[in-house]
Image: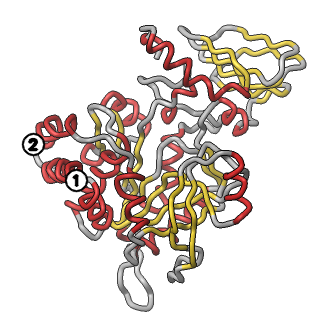
Amino acid sequence: MTTDKATGQATPLDRFIAVIPAGGVGTRLWPLSRAAAPKFLHDLTGSGSTLLRATYDRLEPLAGSRVLVVTGAAHKEAVCRQLPEVNDADLVLESEPKDSGAAIGLAAAILHHRDPDTIMGSFAADHVISPDQLFQDAVKEAIHTAATGKIVTIGIMPTHPSTGFGYIRSGENLKVPGAPTAQSVVEFVEKPDEEVARQYVESGEYVWNAGMFVAPVSLMLKHLEANQPELFAGLQEIAAAWDTPSRDEVTARIWPELPKIAIDYAVAEPAAAAGDVAVVPGTFRWDDVGDFASVGRLNSAGEVDEVTVLGAGARVFTENSSGVVVSDTKRVIALIGIEDVVIVDTPDALLVTTMANSQRVKAAVAALKASGDTDVL
């Protein structure tokens, strides 16, 4: 246990428990990422670690084995195989997706039922972050700030005027001991157009909202109850039964009826309006691996010519070409005189597009679903 040398008292870090929401299919990464094998179960960086395993390893120095994982029931076997350290009581399985409000809210309710003094930190399983030390430094600041009675989001210092992320407008420094960069949050703003995004970045007052929250569980639940009383009541009932033999029965009865809402709308935005939210700006490199262009940016390992190649045993020939090839087959793929191409080869589906069009893969998945071709989704 970490103690303050001057007082002999336990520090806020001792109250910290990490939560890893592992949800979302990642449809822009189809056909590699699918409902049965979403992106967090894949190694998309050529590091030898899946995104989920890397997330756990990044949090372990801060939380030890105090980690709760929230994922779909269909992924239980794969998650347990990748994270054998997580025991059954700390694996929260969703029978159906209910968005982040229910997922993170249930984690908060379970942890509160076990120990109301817990400070939780929620970190998505499908983000790529480096270096780990800078991330851990930011989380430590967030924990110290949360201990003062704040919901803390870790914002990402913007590297360009992105239109793909929400933004957080920061205010004055909060002068929190142990958290020199913690600031108040003025407001959360939705994804802007390019001109507005440029103004945000130039002002120096905004950071990207990466969906990372560190907060006292009691404060999270207070705002959840005030803004989403029906969701709060259902989650409290599940949490009360969680560490009892009636867990499965109660969860099966209540979970399907819970309202769907994102944690930003259920808790973070109303809490910010009440002055209860702070932000710690993160200076680490962060990518949510939203499409195959991201995969190309993140990977230099396995590069042939100017083509990023991913896949165990991939057989790729290139000449005067650039782009990304992800191979899940033993088929030889030859690229000759083609630029910025994206090729994803799996046994039952082949994707061919360009880096510039990689965001449009999501629309193709929607069209396949509408046409009934769900066997490849």
Image position of 67 (left or right of 344): left
Q: Residues within 10 Å of mark 2 (few under 14, many from 20)?
A: few
Q: Mark 1 or mark 2, which has the lower sequence index?
A: 1
- Check disc 2 and report the residue beneath it: 246
Q: Which is nearer the eye, 194 or 343?
A: 194
Q: Position of residue 192 (x, y in %)?
A: 61, 48
Residue 136, percent across and down? 55, 62
Camera sees residue 137: no
Q: Is residue 232 left or right of residue 264?
A: left
Identify the element where label 1 is drawn: helix
Above or below, 250 against 132 in this view is above
- Determine the residue positioned at 52% across, 19% down: 365
CA neighbours of label 1 inside 10 A, class few (<14), some (14 to 19), many (20+): many
Q: Which of 299/173 is in front?
A: 173
Does residue 46 appear to the left or right of 246 in the view shown? right
Q: Which mark is residue 145?
A: none
Residue 357 appears at what percent x and percent y?
Answer: 69, 25
Q: Which quadrant is home to the N terminus?
A: bottom left
Picture layout, residue 165 above or below residue 317: below
- Contact between marks 1 and 2 (CB within 8 A): the answer is no
The residue that mark 1 highlights is 232
Tell me which corner region of the image, top left, top right, bottom left or bottom right, holds residue 63.
Answer: bottom left
Q: Residue at x 67, y 52 (%)?
A: 196
Give the answer, above or below, for where 214 lies relative to 275.
above
Q: Which quadrant would residue 345 be assigned to in this image?
A: top right
- At label 1, which amino acid type do we have? Phe
> Marks 1 and 2, how far apart in space?
19 Å
Q: Is residue 191 visible?
A: yes
Q: Residue at x 57, y 68 (%)?
A: 170
At 67% from the left edge and 8% from the top edge, which residue is drawn? 331
Helix, strand or loop at label 2? It is loop
